[in-house]
Amino acid sequence: MDIESLIAEDPARETFRVHRSVMTSPEIYELERKLVFGRSWLYIGHESEIEKPGDFRRREVAGRPLIFIRGKDGVVRVFFNTCTHWGAKVCRLDQGNATSFQCFYHAWTFNNLGQLIAIPDAGGYPENFNRAELALKSPPHVDNYRGLYFVNLDPDAQPLINYLDGARDYMDLILDQSEAGWRVVAGTQMYTVRANWKLMATNSLDTYHAPPLHTTYFSYMAKFKGLDQQSEADSFGIRAGGHGRSLGNGHGVGESAPSGVARPIAHWHPMFGEAARGEINRVRQRIFERFGPERAGQMCDTFRLFLIYPNFVFHDVMAITLRYFEPVGPDAVRLTVYALAPKDESQEQLERRLNNFVSFLGPGGFAHPDDLEAIESCQDGFRSEAVEWSDFSKGMNRDPEVMDELPMRAFWRQWQAQMLGRERAARFDDLKFAGNGVAAAGK
Amino acid sequence: MPEKSNGRVARRKPADLEREVERFFTMEAALLDEWRLQDWLGLFTKDARYWVPTTDLPEGQAGETLGLIDDDFTRLQARVDRLLSRHAHREFPWSRTRRFVTNVRVNETNGDEVKAMASFLVYRIRNRHVDPYVGHYEYVFRRVDGELRIHRRTAILDLEALDPHATVSFIL
């Protein structure tokens, strides 16, 4: 497999193309499991989901069944969900609180620190039988940034803080929006799409598609203002301007110019109703007090499609979504999506947030189902084989705007580097506007 | 009319009401399978809400938990407009659907309000894929001018995830 040949960048002609076999090939998929998902930092959960000692959530990351748990000592840990005796899953509930996990097969029992604390008929084992090495096993690395937990299956992985690189600036920009901290709201959108996972990654960063693909959403929102859908799309800031940025290690963001997007934090839109105006303006005013007009304006009046390579997306749009996805084959991707909300948000604001979330996003929204139709349609179109390349050149000829494809190019550059066994691509930005990435991120 | 043990006066004989609710579900299923969505909108009260909780939280409540669909009547109208346009790409061309609504239980009647539950199995057929949606409905009807009208329509999926349905792009 000649990985070098799968991406064709021509700086002189300002073109960037990706060979479509990377979206269809079983060999590529097997290699990705090892070189991308086996070596990247992958999101597993948020601290608010396991607040009390003993709280746990079952998770699956890179196809591995995991337990995300806060031990009785208050420390967050991750265990592979498999008994060290014969292998059955020791945790068979999606969530809960437990002081211990007793395997239902032979009743080996582990406490919530992972230690093996009981074996039935222990007389059948020697006195010096090493229980310590039969503790529940953890991935080589577990770390968090501001309460967002990630795991890495590679013993030689760089620290999370280094891996996040310029993405931290945008994580801060989002997480700073709440003074009281954040919680993941109950209710998880879980779905599988018949498309390659990288089509989900590039769709998650893409605004170019919004005006043609999502007209029905803008029609709906426009009615609250007595506008047509085109004017409403314009007012959302998705026509031009804004910027696309690479943030190091394959991370990237597309960020709109100041716009009229409906945001609980904090930009009122008639869709929220007149009664909401006061509260949204109070939230807004507080953010302006805390951060000054420039950063507060960025928080309240612009939206962000923000990917932490390879598979974790913040959509800081109509609400704040946490989305992660992983392949379950070359042509199938499984998604998990949560809503993130300020811990101290009023019931009314929460209701607006959740309502606004599902107006656009999720399996039943007015927009996201059409995204999924589009990527499934691409996957199906690849069967033609006649057209070998997909084009990701948009914006190579200028300082990239929100509707340009620089963040996707940054993703592909890192993907190719990892597939070649390297830790980091030589560069993430285009040559013509080199340095438009990390250095300028969010500043 | 018989008086119920809880003291409420049943407006109709229970068997008649059950039959009426069953006929309603059958008629509604036909409208949806035939994509007669404007007619279907006529079955709702103007303060109606259509709620589909996430698959991991069937007991989820609109306004408190993240769902899949949370429509007031305005958004329900917009949803119908969207589906009848050529721009709901997930449903252009329309999928074929066939729904089986059964095991109807009329749970409670209170004045003009009737609560009912039913099991559903909806097949969505499109692009050579057949995706079954399994679950149950919880309805709150209001009686308007003698007719049952939908005040709350909740569709609760038994699926653990939308694997591989991906979406709830039609009216469930």
Image: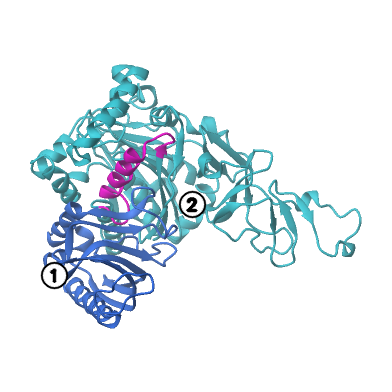
Chain colours: A cyan, B blue
Q: Which residues are magenta?
A: A341-365
Quickly name the residue at label 1.
B36
Seen in the picture, residue A170 relative to A103 is either above or below; the reply is above
The chain that hosts pointer 1 is B
Q: Residues within 10 Å of mark 2 (few under 14, many from 20)?
A: some
Task: Tell me which corner region of the image, top left, top right, bottom left or bottom right, holds residue A431.
Answer: top left
Numbered tag placed on residue A32 in the rendering: 2
Residue A258 placement (x, y as % from top left): 22, 28
Quadrant, the C terminus of chain B: bottom left
Is mark 2 in CB contact (under 8 Å) with mark 1?
A: no
Q: Marks 2 and 1, how far apart in space?
A: 46 Å
Kind of residue at disc 2? Glu
Viewer-nearest residue: A368 or A318: A318
Viewer-nearest residue: B158 or A433: B158
Kind of residue at disc 1? Arg
Looking at the image, can residue A65 be seen? yes
Q: Is residue A40 left or right of residue A215?
A: right
Viewer-nearest residue: A394 or A284: A284
Q: Residue at x 54, y 51 (%)?
A: A34
Quadrant, the N terminus of chain B: bottom left
Tag in front: 2 or 1: 1
Looking at the image, can residue A422 be seen? no
Numbered tag placed on residue A160 in the rendering: none
**Number of marks in the image?**
2
**A352 within the magenta span:** yes
